[in-house]
Image (spheres, grey):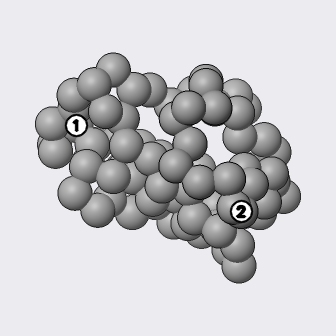
């Protein structure tokens, strides 16, 4: 499980690389990782990332005028995106 400084470093990295970019698609590795289906992940598509926040060990990707994507890396979690 990542420690708090590692989560903060990831937040800094994501802020630098994602802010202002459009979300094209969000694909979970497994459906079991989702805590809710409403709104669906497709609700994020087309929105631009406004900011990335950290709440404890949770990462919160805020979109401009849309839903937030809140993640926790748990034991061996990871994030992957393509340019």
Q: Is residue 52 left or right of residue 6?
A: right
Between residues 70 and 52, which one lies in front from this camera angle? Answer: 70
Which picture quadrant has residue 22? bottom right
- The residue under the point 15% across, 36% down is 3
In the rendered structure, find residue 6 and report the number of the disc placed on it. 1
- Res. 13 visible in picture: yes
- The residue under the point 32% across, 59% down is 54
- Relative height, residue 30 to residue 60 (above, below): above
Label 2: which secondary element: loop
Q: Is residue 10 left or right of residue 23?
A: left
Give the total number of marks visible in the rendering. Answer: 2
Between residues 8 and 60, which one lies in front from this camera angle? Answer: 60
Between residues 22 and 25, which one lies in front from this camera angle? Answer: 25
- Relative height, residue 40 to residue 72 (above, below): below
Mark whose residue sits in front, 1 or 2: 2
Q: Give the x, y percent position of residue 47.
A: 77, 63
Which picture quadrant has residue 73? top left
Q: Residues within 10 Å of mark 1 (few under 14, many from 20)?
A: few
- Relative height, residue 52 to residue 73 (above, below): below
In the rendered structure, find residue 25 and report the number of the disc placed on it. none
- The residue under the point 52% across, 49% down is 35
- Res. 15 visible in picture: no
Between residues 64 and 27, which one lies in front from this camera angle? Answer: 27
Q: Give the x, y percent position of residue 19.
A: 58, 58
- Furthest-bottom residue in view? 65
Which quadrant does the C terminus fall into?
top right
- Relative height, residue 19 to residue 3 (above, below): below
Which picture quadrant has residue 27? top right
- What residue is shown with label 2? 39
Q: Give the x, y percent position of residue 2.
A: 22, 31
């Amino acid at each position: 499980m990542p420690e708090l400084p590692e989560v903060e470093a990831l937040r800094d990295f994501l802020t630098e690389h994602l802010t202002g970019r459009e979300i094209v698609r969000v694909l979970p590795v497994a459906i079991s990782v989702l805590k809710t289906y409403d709104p669906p992940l497709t609700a994020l598509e087309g929105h631009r990332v406004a900011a990335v926040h950290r709440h404890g060990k949770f990462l919160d990707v805020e979109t401009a005028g849309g839903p937030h994507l809140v993640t926790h890396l748990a034991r061996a979690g990871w994030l992957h995106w393509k340019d």
